[in-house]
Image (cartoon, rainbow, N blue to C red):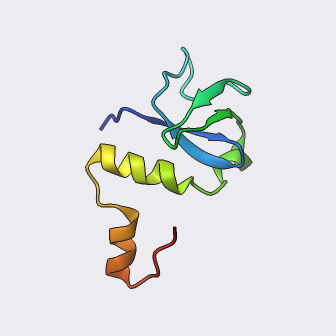
Amino acid sequence: MSHPFVWVPGGGARHASGDVVPLPGVEFPEGVVVSTLCGVEVSAETGEVAWLWGTCRDCDERTRELAGLESLAEVERRAGRVVRS
């Protein structure tokens, strides 16, 4: 299933972006400035370690909304976890 966003590591976290990834790649090249769904701009980073960074919560919430999934807060509520802000 295709979504109107892609994931990109940058600024110490994995963010989501609606920007178009330049051809022929499947990820943004190192150093490309990308607008994110949380409203910040990050310089794309590549490599295995960057993909292991934590996910930006605001980007995660926005992608869930775009994909028609329940919010993280709802998932946490059902699981009995304390909701972070």
Residue 64 sits above or below residue 41 on the image: below
Residue 62 on image: x %, y % = 40, 47
- Can residue 28 be seen at all in this image of the molecule? no
Q: Tell me which corner region of the image, top left, top right, bottom left or bottom right, holds residue 9.
A: top right
Residue 29 on image: x %, y % = 67, 24
**Residue at figure coordinates x 62%, y 57% from the top left:** 54
**Residue at figure coordinates x 49%, y 48% from the top left:** 59
- Which residue, as the protein is rendered here, is positioned at the far bottom? 80
**As drawn, is 60 to the left or to the right of 8?**
left
- Which residue, as the protein is rendered here, is positioned at the far top? 23
Taking depth in this image into account, of 47 and 59 the one nearest to the observer is 59
Which of the image's four quarters has the N terminus? top left
Taking depth in this image into account, of 38 and 30 the one nearest to the observer is 38
- Can residue 54 be seen at all in this image of the molecule? yes
Number of residue marks: 0
Q: Tell me which corner region of the image, top left, top right, bottom left or bottom right, holds residue 11.
A: top right
**Residue at figure coordinates x 54%, y 27% from the top left:** 26
Taking depth in this image into account, of 75 and 58 the one nearest to the observer is 58
Residue 38 sits above or below residue 41 on the image: below
- Which residue, as the protein is rendered here, is positioned at the far left? 68
**Residue at figure coordinates x 53%, y 22% from the top left:** 21
**As drawn, is 73 to the left or to the right of 34?**
left
Residue 13 sits above or below residue 3 on the image: below
Residue 30 sits above or below residue 7 on the image: above
Residue 53 on image: x %, y % = 66, 54
Residue 18 on image: x %, y % = 45, 30
